[in-house]
Amino acid sequence: MTARSGDGTLSAVSFDLSVWALPPGATPDDVRAAVQRCREGRHGERHPDPRVVGFYRAITGAYPDRPAGPGSPWEVAPLHTAADHVAMHLLPTCEDQVLLDIERLAGEHDLMLFDPQDGSVYAPPARVAP
């Protein structure tokens, strides 16, 4: 990813995303509250949500994180995983295809996307109402 600085030049910036497995009907505020609990180190004792496990296996099948090899999109590896989410810190040079794959896999696994850069929450395509 790149961003324009005040003088119009391009500079590299990192990009973070996380995917969340919350109950049906969860709202963006529910996701933000879950993110806050994670930031505070409060991870409930529970078994990993199968949606999170499926997403993690799929994304790391395409882009390994243990170890992250040459050409890896991960700025931090291994990825942060918890029972209800996976947090991904992407390199500034990450290709757009990686982001498209994250969005696609979030939809396939019924996970909500959280963008900590601006606090946006996105329902995956499979959950967007027509």
Image (cartoon, rainbow, N blue to C red):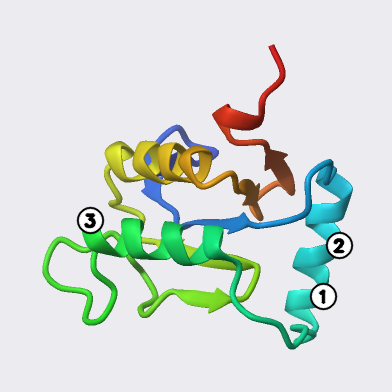
Could you tell which of marks 1 and 3 lies nearer the N-terminus?
1
Q: Nearer the viewer, residue 43 or 98?
A: 43
Q: Is residue 28 above or below residue 45?
A: above
Amino acid type, mark 2: Ala
How packed mark 3 is, by other alpha carbons closer than 10 Å (few <14, some 14-19, many 20 or more), is few
Left or right: where 12 falls relative to 25: left
How packed mark 2 is, by other alpha carbons closer than 10 Å (few <14, some 14-19, many 20 or more), is few
Q: CA distance from mark 2 to mark 3?
A: 30 Å
Query: Which residue carries the number 1 mark?
Result: 37
Measuring 44% from the left and 54% from the top, which residue is drawn there?
13
Q: Quadrant of the N terminus?
A: top left
Mark 1–mark 3 CB contact (< 8 Å):
no
Measuring 35% from the left and 78% from the top, which residue is drawn there?
77
Q: Is residue 47 above or below residue 5?
A: below
Left or right: where 43 falls relative to 59: right
Could you tell which of marks 2 and 3 lies nearer the N-terminus?
2
Q: Nearer the viewer, residue 117 or 26?
A: 26
Q: Helix, strand or loop at disc 1?
A: helix
Q: Nearer the viewer, residue 93 or 12?
A: 93
Query: Which residue carries the number 2 mark?
Result: 33
Mark 2–mark 3 CB contact (< 8 Å):
no
Amino acid type, mark 1: Arg
Which mark identifies residue 64?
A: none
Where is residue 58 drawn, in percent x and y? 33, 56
Mark 2–mark 1 CB contact (< 8 Å):
yes
Q: Nearer the viewer, residue 26 or 46?
A: 46
Where is residue 120 drawn, in percent x and y? 72, 42
Q: Is residue 117 above or below residue 3?
A: below
Q: Helix, strand or loop at disc 3?
A: helix
Q: Helix, strand or loop at disc 2?
A: helix
Which mark identifies residue 62?
A: 3
- Disc 2 or disc 3, which is closer to the eye? 3
